[in-house]
Amino acid sequence: MFYRWFGYETIPAPITDEFDYAWQGLSLRQYGLPVGWTILDHIYKESKYQSRLASVDKFGVISDGKRIDLREFQKDRRPLIAVKEIDYTKGLEHMLFVAPFFDHPPLAGLIYSLGVGSEIKEFAEVKPAEFRRPALILAIVTAVLLFIFICLITSNPWIAALAIIIYSTVPTYLLATRTAFAENVEPPFILTHLIVLFLAVRLHTKQLNKWLILSALTLSGLIGGLAFLVKEPAIGFLIGSVVLLLINKLPKRYILVFLLQPGF
């Protein structure tokens, strides 16, 4: 536990994408419109979108003298582009901010932004020690869920304990799990989704109450949908889950209930 927390704000060295997740979440929470740094400027600047020039102010943008929050953006849906000189780790740089920022889904950014104190008012004031704190907590939650999942599929707590020891101490994992990337937000959602899904399959195998099975499938589908809001590759787990349900011969109406949840 000591080494998991030791030097987490500098080891490994933070990169721009980590800041970007926090910025996205902070702007979305404060103004309802995600703002973030992008290298995909050629997309936002396409002529068909008729992008507007703006300036960065606090965690949002201002254009034509107006702060553009979600309500203002609904009146004029053209994307906004702003250049800001900012020093996040490597000295002053000119960075291109866009609104609405949709390079990444929003849920990871919202979670990482929870570590940033209310006294922070500007993008430049956000520090790794703040947005990396949720990543450390997520790593501990992931370890607990990993233990439960492996116990569920192997019925052997010793194998589960070995998995936790590896996950918690191998340097590669130790360093990776302290970074504020979407990949570290996905495991808790995916593991919870799989735990509930496997329980639903077991309930069906034992021919227990159908409403209990449907409830488990509904919960699993909802959590799987949240994983997709963290990062798009999570859809692979949803597809794999459908295959699992088909292999275990669950009724098609049950599978339909499971698939409807991510849609919501």
Image (spheres, rainbow, N blue to C red):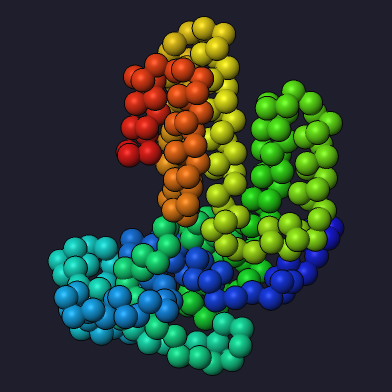
Residue at the outermost front position: 247
Residue found 43% across the figure and 35% down from its top: 222
Q: Residue at x 59, y 30 (%)?
A: 195
**Residue 73 occupies quadrant:** bottom left
Q: Is residue 208 above or below residue 240?
A: above
In this rendering, position of residue 64 left or right of residue 121: left
Which quadrant holds the C terminus?
top left
Q: Nearer the viewer, residue 16 or 172?
A: 172
Side of 5 where 187 appears, left or right: left
**Residue 92 vertical placement versus 3 (above, below):** below
Q: Measuring 81% from the left and 48% from the top, which residue is drawn there?
A: 166
Total residue callouts: 0
Residue at 74%, 23% in the rendered image: 155
Query: Which image quadrant for residue 146?
Result: top right
Q: Quadrant of residue 70?
A: bottom left
Q: Is residue 69 above or below residue 138?
A: below
Residue 99 in picture, x, y percent from top left: 32, 72
In this rendering, would 90 be left or right of 262?
right
Tell me if I can see residue 26 in this picture: no
Measured from the top left, where is residue 98 in percent x and y?
34, 76
Asked whether residue 256 appears in the rendered view, the answer is: yes
Q: Is residue 45 above or below residue 230?
A: below
State left or right for residue 104 relative to residue 143.
left
Tell me residue 61's x, y (percent): 33, 77
Compare residues 121 and 23 and report the one nearer the observer.
Answer: 23
Q: Position of residue 174 (x, y in %)?
A: 76, 58
